[in-house]
Amino acid sequence: KGGDIHYMALHNEIAEVLPDPAQPFPTSPLYLRPDDTRWSHEDLHVVDKLRSKVAEKRIRMKEFFQDFDPLRKGFCTPGQTKTVFTVLNLSKDIDKRDFEQLLATYMGEDGLFNYSRLVDDVDNAFTVPGLEKTPMATISFPDAGTTSPARRNTMKLTPKRLSKVGRVEDKVRTFVRKRRAEMKPMFQ
């Protein structure tokens, strides 16, 4: 027959002569530069972090811990503590080192976590113990200073970096003064 092409036979003949080479795919080795940046959250104690997050979210931690403590003795296991922090959505704010520090602070000799002491320490941010004995007492609501550790994580700059930032600010300041450029509309 004239003009008919058997494509499968053509493919098989070419495939026998030219084997399919492995296709190279691009790789990118992950080289991380060392980062010596210090952050303000690194210096905070874990209870201060929890206190500010609880005050910000207005959470009552005691009821969540009591779900794991049927006798209401004030103790639970470390695993249950981790579960409570996960349920309260606080586990993302506490890393492993902070959790170990928390366990070391509130763990008893019997291996149980004393959540009642933790709750008392955390609740001091926005309530006064024994308030029911003085019903006419007034307490202040948490202000921005109470919740700022939960909301702000600033870089701790070395004196060298601070001087570099100061030089950049001076350059921008002189540029704005010389050119009389209006900076406010650029940031609105």
Image: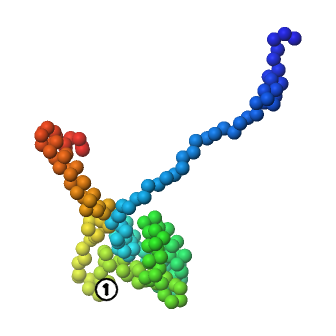
For label 1, the residue is 130
Residue 122 in sight = yes
Q: In front: 162, or 187? A: 162
Residue lying at 78% horizontally and 27% vertically, measured from the top left: 14
The kind of residue on which mark 1 rests is Gly
Q: Residue furthest bottom?
A: 109
In the picture provided, is 119 more to the left or to the right than 146?
A: right
Position of the N terminus, as image quadrant, is: top right
Q: In front: 93, or 12? A: 12
The x and y percentages for residue 105 are 43, 82
Residue 151 in sight = no
In the picture provided, is 29 more to the left or to the right than 185?
A: right
Is 188 drawn above or below residue 42 in the view shown?
above
Q: Secondary structure at mark 1?
A: loop
Q: Residue furthest top?
A: 2
The x and y percentages for residue 138 are 23, 78
Mark 1 surroundings: few (<14), some (14-19) or many (≥20) residues within 10 A: few
The x and y percentages for residue 165 are 24, 54
The x and y percentages for residue 61 are 42, 74
Position of the C terminus, as image quadrant, is: top left
**Within the image, what quadrant is residue 37 found in?**
bottom left
Q: How is the image coloured?
A: rainbow
**Within the image, what quadrant is residue 119 found in?**
bottom left
Badge count: 1
Residue lying at 46% horizontally and 81% vertically, measured from the top left: 104
In the picture provided, is 172 more to the left or to the right than 62?
A: left
Is 50 drawn above or below residue 24 in the view shown?
below
Q: In front: 130, or 98? A: 98
Q: In front: 164, or 82? A: 164
Residue lying at 47% horizontally and 76% vertically, measured from the top left: 100
In the picture provided, is 89 more to the left or to the right than 137?
A: right
